[in-house]
Amino acid sequence: MTSASDRPDPNATDDTATPADVMTVLTTGDLELIGQVRTASNATLVCDAVLGDERLRCVYKPVRGEQPLWDFPDGTLAGREVASYRISAALGWSVIPETVLRGGKFGPGMVQRWIDTPEPRDVVPDRLDLVDLCPAELVPDDYRRILDAYDARGEEVTLVHADDPRLLRMAVLDVIINNADRKGGHVLEGLDGNVYGVDHGICLHVEDKLRTVLWGWAGDVIPAHLVADVVGLCDVLATETSDLAAELAELITPAEVAALLERAEFLAEVPEMPTPARSRPIPWPAF
């Protein structure tokens, strides 16, 4: 989410709050500006949401700070982030941190719980990230190869990601929400032991736009327990009185909600991870 120099003091985050507490503080707490993630392409502000004695570190992305895109309607990225969170939550997966749409100092925008992560690799040099580059001959057995390339010094390197069930669940979610921008830097290993995905502003398009670094399971059969969760999502979305469908309809278009259900139903019927047989399978830059 941010570089080491951008990283706020993690001690300000209340990691003991329950999910219900988190949503209440995110939704109604006063947003106190702490700083800005300077490397982000859209305006990304680090804040504390303060409600009474509760203080929760969060990220605030105002709609007015979104950069225009040629293939996504202007001013819709915050809603897509919230919709992606609600889909993850409906699946029973904690892939995306708690996310709400609310007002702030710079107008309406997305507010999401901050994720504290382990020290960067310049502090722990022997530790591979969940998505990383390593010498081609030194790929660990518990990592999957994505592609071979050359680094800035002309050395051969391999793009890899961990063969981790937490990461596989994220990869399945990306197929469902049609994530067009799953970069390595959007994968966070939290200090709480969970693996989180962030930056879901360019998801849920009606056209196939899946671009990801998580191709290591391409062609593999999806585990049955994940398929069961997808079937449950399909049942909820297909129900005429579905609260989830109504909530999503306020965040994305009816055509996009219908396309979401179609992708989920196809994955439930053909539970196999897609292959990178497309013109732009990996977002660039990959990190």
Image (spheres, rainbow, N blue to C red):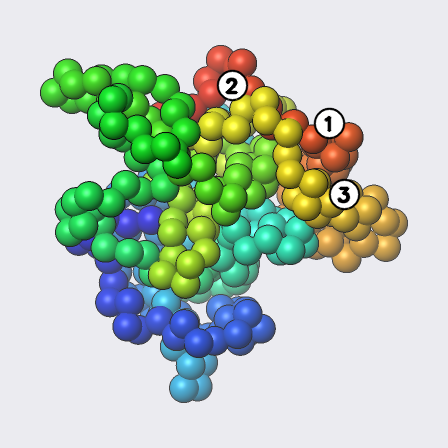
Q: Which residue is mark 1?
A: 270
Q: Residue at x 38, y 52 (%)?
A: 189
Residue 47 is left or right of residue 83, and the answer is left
Q: Residue at x 49, y 63 (%)?
A: 103
Q: Is residue 108 above or below residue 43?
A: below
Query: Of the numbered discs in the image, which one, if any, rests on residue 276?
Result: 2
Query: Of the numbered discs in the image, which one, if any, rests on residue 194?
Result: none
Measured Cα–Cα span from mark 2 to mark 3? 24 Å
Q: Residue at x 59, y 33 (%)?
A: 175
Residue 286 is left or right of residue 165, and the answer is left
Q: Which residue is mark 3?
A: 231
| Place of residue 251 in the rendered image (x, y in percent of width and height, measured from the top left) | 63, 48
Which image quadrant is residue 129 in?
top left
| Place of residue 104 in the rendered image (x, y in percent of width and height, measured from the top left) | 44, 64
Residue placed farthest to the left in the image? 153
Most foreground residue, 38 or 217: 217
Tally of marks = 3
Q: Amino acid at mark 3?
A: Val
Q: Is residue 64 above or below residue 103?
A: above
Q: Quadrant of the C terminus?
A: top left
Dot 1 or dot 2, earlier in sequence: 1
Residue 202 is left or right of residue 186, and the answer is right
Q: Residue at x 18, y 50 (%)?
A: 124
